[in-house]
Image (cartoon, helix red, strand yellow):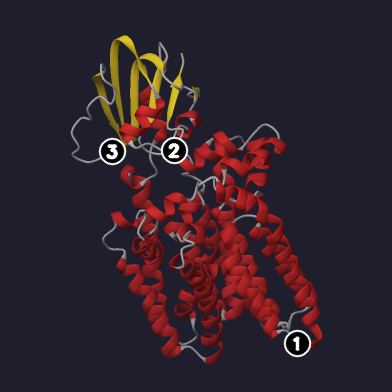
Amino acid sequence: MATSERPRRAVLAAPLLALCALAALLRFPTLDLQSFWFDEAVTVVDDLRPSLAATLARLPSQELAPPLYFVLAWAWSRPFGTGEVGLRSLSALIGTLTVPVAYAAGAQLVSRRSGLAAAALVAVSPLLVYYSQEARPYALVILLGGVSFLLFTRALEAGARGRTLAGWAIVSALALATHYFAAFLVAPEALWLLARSPRGRRAGAALAVALVGATGFALLPLALTQLASGGATWIGRIPLSARLLDFPEKYSAGWQSAENPAWPLPALLLALSLALLAARGDSRERRGAALALLLAAATLLVPLALAFGGLDFFTFRHLMVVAVPLIVGLAAGFGVRRAGRVGSVALAALCLGSVAVNALVFATPRLQRDDWRAASAVLGRPSAPRVLAFTSFSREPVQAYGHRVEEAIAPAVRVSELVLIGNTVAGAPPPRPPVPGFRLFDRRTVQKLTVVRYRSDPPRPVGEAALVEELGLFPHAVVLERP
């Protein structure tokens, strides 16, 4: 290494380490601030079993994702437990590790300054902080998608050398084993590598692509079994136009972007980055950023085209695998060599705004996940058998907080208490008793959830089918809780 190179790398190492520390600071201290929400409760209650074999056996009927995250979460939960801090700390660690990956990808493609810009946005992004505090596969697929992208760019730069190709193939296969939608990133990378590999190395590229393809085919039976369960039908109920708007909103201002009327401001700063790239970037910088943006566009447009064709699973959550290449492309202009103070000030403003959004979420309960922990505490323990009906989602959140329930109450069970639990509708009048003979006894609102109790003396029969039809509930949303 040239002696002039060492001080330059040392100068860059300090801000990168500071960004990693900032990422950890935004992710770890508040891991238990918010309760588990429904999807996380499914991980805790339905997926993670005492043995790894039992955990894997649950996935075909309980999940819509491949097994890798759940294998890691099972192993992680052995020493750290399945509480909010214990289980989410895996995602927080993974989210923190994504910061240097974003730097390396940006430095490889554009410049070291652009790499630092990408790392900064990954560190403070409200959306990535959100997924770094969630016990689900998304933080892992973001990291693996980022490493796949990094190794893809290195393989292009190095002319598809064997070791780099092998690394790309292994990481891409792991990304597929984390989330099926990783295929929409990995497939264009594979085609690009095949097209750009030197003639003497095409066999190696083909072998690497074949390994990734074999992984996909091996996962296909599991994917089809999970799809047949109907767990993805909720996606089609949301208008496609709303799901498309989610991308600029949530990448700009995080998960609760709908609560933030200023979300277009970060989007405008990202547009300024693209303008700086076009006006002040040199040919190499523009070419590298264009590669990242083209790959991100391909990752997004293929599932969008499938949605228009009737195979509609398009949602920003499933496409979080694109986060690193998209951020590298969007942040490139902040760090081009001729960006000057404009780029530095714009990047600083975007980062400070993102930190402020994170702080606002941490301080504002209505911007946080549904507080099932508090709702479960309000629910208390029954003195006699009672029926719980969940108007939002299903039974798993209260089970995660210690309530022992039974699903089988068909055709009916005699109880003196019926409880409805679900999201609060602002200004809604007290709901009428859904079963004749019951009267409203108590109604409490906890954050964004409402717990409504009905009682009857003497006990009366309550049936699952009648409640599901009357209230339009999800399957398995009516359960029996015993003392």
Looking at the picture, which amino acid does disc 3 mark? Thr
The three-letter amino acid code for the residue at tag 2 is Ser
- Which element is circle 3 on? loop
How would you rate the neighbour count of disc 2 (Cα within 10 Å): few for under 14, some for 14-19, many for 20 or more? Answer: many
What residue did someone put label 2 on?
35
Q: Earlier in the sequence, mark 3 or mark 1?
A: 1
Provide the residue designation for mark 3.
424
Q: Check if mark 3's residue and mark 1's residue have beta carbons within 8 Å.
A: no
Q: Amino acid at mark 1?
A: Pro
Query: What residue is shown with label 1?
Result: 198
296, 113: nearer the viewer: 296
* Image quadrant in which the N terminus is located: bottom right
Tag shown at residue 159? none
Q: Quadrant of residue 394?
A: top left
Instruction: Answer with mark 3 or mark 2, whichever residue precedes in sequence.
Output: 2
Q: Position of residue 361 (x, y in %)?
A: 36, 49
Q: Is residue 422 left or right of residue 185?
A: left
Q: Residue at x 71, y 38 (%)?
A: 52
> Is residue 337 in view?
yes
N-term-proximal mark, 1 vs 2: 2
Rendered view: 203 above or below 257: below
* Other residues around mark 1 within 10 Å, as few (<14) / some (14–19) / many (≥20): some
Total count of labels: 3
Can I make out residue 3 in this image?
no
Measured as percent of width and height from the top left, residue 3 is found at 71, 82
Asked where in the image residue 262 lies, by quadrant, the reply is bottom left
Is residue 289 found left or right of 423 in the rendered image?
Answer: right
Q: Is residue 61 left or right of residue 467?
A: right
Indicate the position of residue 187 as horizontal and vertical percent values: 62, 71
Q: Name the foreground residue: 261 vs 205.
A: 205
